[in-house]
Image: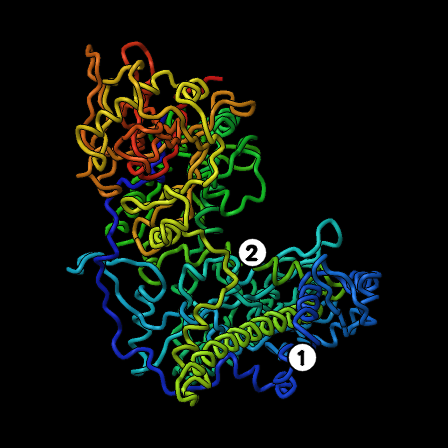
Amino acid sequence: MSTNPNDYATHNYPDFVHMATDDFEGAAKTFGLGPTFMDKFNGNQFSNLQASNLYYPFNSHNEWELASWLLCSGLSMRAIDSFLSLSIISLSLFSLKIIIDVHQIQLLNISFHTARALHGLAELLPGGLCWHSMEITPSRPTKHPVHLYWCDPLECIVWLLKHPLFSDQLDFIPRHVYNMPKKLCRVYTEWMTADDAWCMQSQLLSGVTLLGMILSSDKTNITTLCGGRVAHPLLISLANIKMPTHLKLSSNSFMLAALLPIPKFVHKNKCMCGLLKDRLIHEYLDIILEPVKQAAKLSIMLPDPLGHMWYLVKSKVHPTNIQVFFHEAQCFHLSRVSDPFWRDILLSCPSTFITQEPLHHLHKEFWDHNMKWCINAVGEAEINFCFSVLQPTAGFHHFKGGVAKLKQVTGCVHHDVQHYIISVIAGPAPPKIITAIFQAYCIDDDNLCIISSVLDEFHMHKQSILNHSAQCGKGNKPIDNWHIPKLELMQSIIPSVKHVGVTIQWTADVTEHTHVSEIKTPTSASSNNNYDPQICQYLDCTEKCRTFELTTSLYESKTHSHGHAEEKSLEVEDGSSDDGNSEISDCKEADLVSKTPGPMWPITNYFAISACLRTQDPDSIPFPLHSFITDGMVINLSYDPPLQHISVDGAAKKFGLLDLQAALVNFLNCEKVYGPSSVHTISGQCRGSSSSTLPFTDLQVWYKMWLQNMVIHDITDILPAQTLFCSPPCKTWTLGRYDAAIINVDPHFKWPESSLKGSWSTLLFHVTHKSILGHVVGQLHLLMHPFGKRGVRWLWTDHFLVYIQCFDIAAEDATHLHILRCAKRVNGQHLGDVIPFSQVRVFTHLIPHFRQTADN
C-alpha cells in the first residue's frame, strides 16, 4: 500500500500563531459617518407605512414569506398563476379560515390574485441596483441590433461595501506577513499581503483606501439542444473581501454587472469577424467602466456597512483602416485590439492584473497534458482499472468507470484526480516521467524556491515524455515539441504569487457557479425569447426580495433587543426610564450586523460543540461525552451507536478479530502500570491471554466517527470533518470497510511537525516487532466503549477505545510515498492492538501499490 503525501504534512509548515506582520502605515483611514445599508430602507417612499406594517406592501409576515418564495423559486408566470388558482389558495383569497394543523387555525388574507399582481407588489419594494440599456452601433453591419445592458459598476462596489453580511469580512490595509518574528521568510496569502497592493498604496496619498476590483467574463450556454443560445456575463467583485468568504460559492460575493452582447457580423472572413468582436468587447467595457475610471482619477468617499466613510481610489483592473490593421497585426502575431479598456485606468497593468487562474490554467494544463501523458505512458485500460478499484472515501469522488473518458470535468474532480494520480502511476510509469509530472504546493518564500526547483526538474526530465511517445496530438500521433501555452504560463506562477497573492483566490470555480444563479436560473423562468432584459428584470426582483428579507430580519432583531432593554428598565426602582436604552448604540448595531446569519453554508464546528459540552452541567447531558478535543483535533461520535450491546466475543467474531480479548487485557495491564493518562505504545505481542478475565462483558460499537482538524498553516481555521468508517463485513463490503489514520505512540512527538518520524521496523529472524518512537499508520477495525460489570471497580468509565491493525513502512519510492505492508506476527496473524481514541491524529489515504501491472 502507498500513502498519498497530500493527506498529511511531510514538511514543517509556518505556525501562524508566531507570524509577524508589517502593516502599511497611514492607509485606510475613516472620515466621519455616512449612510448605511439600513438608511436606504428607512428612506424609501413607503417608510411611513412600514412603521405600522413592517412588511408593506404585503399584509403580513406570512404573506411576505409566500410571495418571496414564489418570486425567487424560478417559476414562470404561468406556473405561479396555476399555483394561485389552486382551491386551497383561492379560498384564502376570500379571507376564509382554513385549518393549518390540528392545533392552529390561521386567517390567510392574500392580497395578490395573479402572477402579474404579485410582480406589481414586488416592484414597490425598496430598489436595488439600477439597470441601464443602450443600443450600440458597430463599425460594421450586424445581422441583428446590438443592445447593451449594464449596472453602474461603482454602484455595485458600493453595494458590496455597504452589505451587512460583509461587515467583518473586508480588508483595507496592505501588509507584509512573515512566518516568524525574525521576518526572514515572507508569506503570501491574499491580495493585500502581496507586492502589488503595497506598491499601489505607496503611490497614493496618506489615508486613502485602496480597492481591488475583480472583473470576470466568460461565455455560458443558456439553452441546450435548442437554438444554442449563449450569454456573455460580466461579473464584478472586490478583492478586499477576505478569501475564505470570497471563495464560498453561496456567499454572493460576485454580482452581475453587465450582459455583453454577442453580435453576428455580416462578413465572409471569420477571422475578421473575430477581430470586430474583440474590439467591440473593449468598447462595451469602456462604456461600462467609465464611472470607475472617473473615480480612480478623482477619488471618492464611500461608506462601509457601519456607515464609516472611506476615501477610496479604485485600481486593478485607433487605426482608421481596419483591413490594413488586421493584416499588419497578423504578421507580427499581435493582439488585434488597438484601444484596450484598461488604457486610462490608474495603476493598471495587464502583466499583473491578468492573474493566473487555477481552473482554466493549472487544472486544465494538468488535464489536457499531464493526464494524457500518464494515460499514454501507462495505458488507458490500465489506468482506468487502477482508478476503479480505489476504495471509496467520504468527501472524494470515486471513479468506478475510470478517468480516461471523463467529459466536462469540474474543479473538484480535477482536485480528486490530482490527489490520486501520483500513487496510481507510481508502479507502472517510468520513474523519469513520474519525476517530471510531480508538483509542489504551499506558498511562502521557501515554497517558491521549491516550486522553482520542481519546474527546473520538469524541464530536465521532460525529454523522457517524448522518448516514450507520451506527448500525442490529434489521431494519437506523437508530437516532438513543447509548444504548449499553458505550460509556458507555469513559469509565471512565482512572479504572480509575489505580485497578487496565492493563485487559489482567483479561481473561476466561484464565477462559473455564479453563472447558474445569475444567468441560467433567470433564463429558465423567461419566455425563451429576448433573454437579456428578462434576466435583468428577474435579478432586479430577486435582489429586492433578498434586501427586503435582510432588512426586515435586522429590524426584528432590533425590536427583540428593544424588548429586553425595556424589561430591564422596568426593573429600576424609581420607575424612571433609561434614555440610553431607547435606541441601539453603534457598538450594539455592529455586533448585531456581524452576527446576522449569512448565505454561507457553515462547516460544523465540533471544536465549539465539544467546548460547549464541557461547560454544561454534567447532570443535564449524557455521560460520557461523545465529542472531545485532544491535541489539536476533535473526535465526534453519535450518541446512538449501531450496536448498543454486544459481547466481547460477539464483537470479535463479527469483526474477525481473534485476539480482541487479549488486546483488551494488554491495554488494561498497561493502564495499571503507567496510569490512565499515559500514551500507549503498540507492542509486537499481546502480554494478555485470551482466557484472562475482563472487568466488563459488553461493548457499545460504532461503525463510523468524525475527525476534525485545523488547517496546518492557520490554526484559527478549521477543516470540514472527515468521516472515518469502521464497519463489519456486509453484502456491499464483503471484507468490511476500514479507513486508516495516523496514530501517535509517543507524547514527545507532535503532529504534523514530526511527520512520520519513527515507525515500525521488522527485525529479520526475530519473533517480535519493536516500535520506534513517533507515529505509525494504522487501520481502524473496531470503535468501542466498554460497559463495566456491576460491583466491579476499574480505573475508568469514560474511555472510548479503537482496535487498530498496523503497517510496516517498508520503503519510500521515487515520489517519496511510503510503501506499507501489513505487520504480522510469527503465526501470520495481523498485528493489532487497542489504544484510546485520543491517540488518533488524522485521516490518511491508503492506495494499492499497483506495481508494473495491476493484479486483476
Left or right: 18 with respect to 35? left
Return the residue nearer the eye: 494 or 741: 741
Residue beneath label 1, please? Answer: 56
State whether residue 650 is above or below residue 530: above
Residue beneath label 2, please? Answer: 513
Q: Quadrant of the N terminus?
A: top left
State whether residue 840 is above or below residue 178: above
Question: Is residue 692 in view from this perspective?
Answer: yes
Return the residue nearer the eye: 684 or 649: 649
Left or right: 230 with respect to 667? right
Q: Residue 186's quadrant in the figure?
A: bottom left
The secondary structure type at the circle numbered 1 is: loop
Return the residue nearer the eye: 300 or 33: 33
State whether residue 341 is above or below residue 187: below
Image location of residue 387, percent across then percent down: 49, 30
Left or right: 768 with respect to 103? left
Q: Residue at x 29, y 83 (%)?
A: 206
Q: Residue 110's quadrant in the figure?
A: bottom right
Q: Residue 506's quadrant in the figure?
A: bottom left
Q: Amino acid at mark 1?
A: Tyr
- The label number, if any, that marks residue 735 in the structure image: none
The secondary structure type at the circle numbered 2 is: helix
Q: Residue furthest front?
A: 791
Image location of residue 596, percent across then percent down: 48, 68
How packed mark 1 is, by other alpha carbons closer than 10 Å (few <14, some 14-19, many 20 or more), is some
The coloring applied to the image is rainbow
How packed mark 2 is, by other alpha carbons closer than 10 Å (few <14, some 14-19, many 20 or more), is few
Q: Residue at x 59, y 75 (%)?
A: 151
Q: Residue furthest left?
A: 182
Image location of residue 853, percent across then percent down: 44, 19
